[in-house]
Image: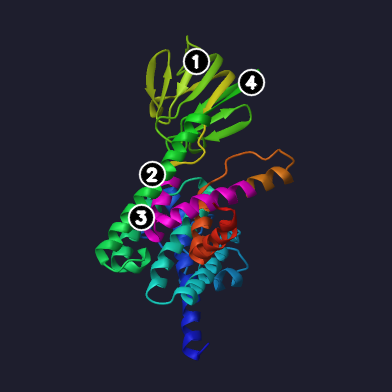
Amino acid sequence: MTHQAGVLAGFAFVFGAVVGSFLNACIHRLPRGIRLDHPRRSFCPHCNVTIPWYHNLPIVSWLWLRGRCAKCGAPISPRYILVEILTGVVFLALWLKCGLPLAPAYMVFAALLIAATFIDFEHYIIPDEITLGGAVAGVVASAILPELMDVEAHWQGALFSLVAGALGAAALWVIVEAGKMAFGRKRIELDPAEEFHLEPDPENPRLVIGEETHPWEEIFSRPSDVLVLECERATLDGAPAKDPTIRVYYNRVVADGRETPLEGVRELAGMLRAVVIPREAMGLGDVKFLACIGAFLGWQAIIFTIVMSSVIGAIVGGGMLLFTRGQAGGKIPYGPYLALGAALWLACGPEMVDWYLHLIRPALP
């Protein structure tokens, strides 16, 4: 490697670390509804003090402060330095593999994958700013660089990207809807009956059953989802419910044939003997995320990403069941598997497909 190439490679890593610092802000702010153009700079989530620039240098500041806030001493999540190092390494790899003119476009795409992965791990959502915004960015990038879609004309690049994004969303939407029809509800019997109550906090509504608290975002994935409470007895705003079956939607409660907006509920409590919860194999955020992937990588990558994400998910899920002796449970985000499948396509996807086709060719008629 020449001196100039080494300098450019080093710059790619440093630039990636800086972008990683910005991604940390996205990961913290987007799911909490905090605008990225908020007038305040980065601030400590514990003491709320604005962080000066010299304590906000990528990688270096976290190591210098030993992972703690300089003002209050509260621990700073290792996620911050992990995202900065990961983004730097990924940007360096993309620069060495692709160079100009493709590397900058793939760097934008990689940044979207990283942000989506860490947000989905923590909050089980992928914000539209990443999915839909990323799909638009993919179409624009493909119009400017039609090589992304392996075509020559700019209009072809935009068209192929748009079609690939639409195909990606449509393919995963069909899978989501099929899964919803087959496994969309789960009934849980409670014997003996347990106390429950609704905490209708406008910012963070929750359902408490016994000693377990269930945030709204873990229950409802779409407006049509319904939570069915089969009660021994229940009261709604101080009045006993005549019908023991109460239906709860993400924005309203239906009891005795009367709808009450969620923000208008003061009290919902009683004894619960069974509950029917809505279930999703994947959320619609994953559908939009695959549209973003298709817009950047093309239709072949959609098939590869769906297959590889399913294989990786099966391996991880099987490993969790094995190591927990069948006790693994809870909600597992699918977005990271999609991101990893897309990253594999970028790294060596076409080569993996060629190897597999060569492997099975003798068995084909």
On whether residue 299 falls in the magenta region, the answer is yes
Q: Distance between the residues labelled 3 and 2?
A: 14 Å
Q: How far apart are marks 2 and 1 (CA)?
A: 36 Å
Label 3 or label 2, whichever lies nearer to me, is 2
Q: How far apart are marks 3 and 4 (CA)?
A: 44 Å
Residue 271 relative to residue 296: left or right = right
Question: Considering depth in this image, is 299 or 316 the residue closer to the camera?
Answer: 299
Indicate which disc residue 245 carries.
1
Mark 2 vs mark 4: which is more N-terminal?
Answer: 2
The kind of residue tagged 2 is Ala
Residue 76: % across, % down:
58, 60
Q: Which residue lies furthest to the left in this view?
A: 155
Q: Distance between the residues labelled 4 and 1?
A: 15 Å
Residue 270: % across, % down:
55, 18
The kind of residue tagged 3 is Ala
Q: How far apart are marks 2 and 4 (CA)?
A: 39 Å
Indicate which disc residue 135 carries.
3
The kind of residue tagged 4 is Leu
- Determine which residue is flagged by label 2: 170
Give the image's coloring scheme: rainbow
Mark 3 vs mark 4: which is more N-terminal?
Answer: 3
Mark 3 vs mark 2: which is more N-terminal?
Answer: 3
Q: Dot 1 surroundings within 10 Å: few (below 14), some, or many (20 or more)?
A: many
For label 1, the SS is strand
Whether residue 332 appears in this view of the structure is yes
- Determine which residue is flagged by label 4: 190
Q: Residue furthest bottom?
A: 3
For label 3, the SS is helix
Label 3 or label 4, whichever lies nearer to me, is 3
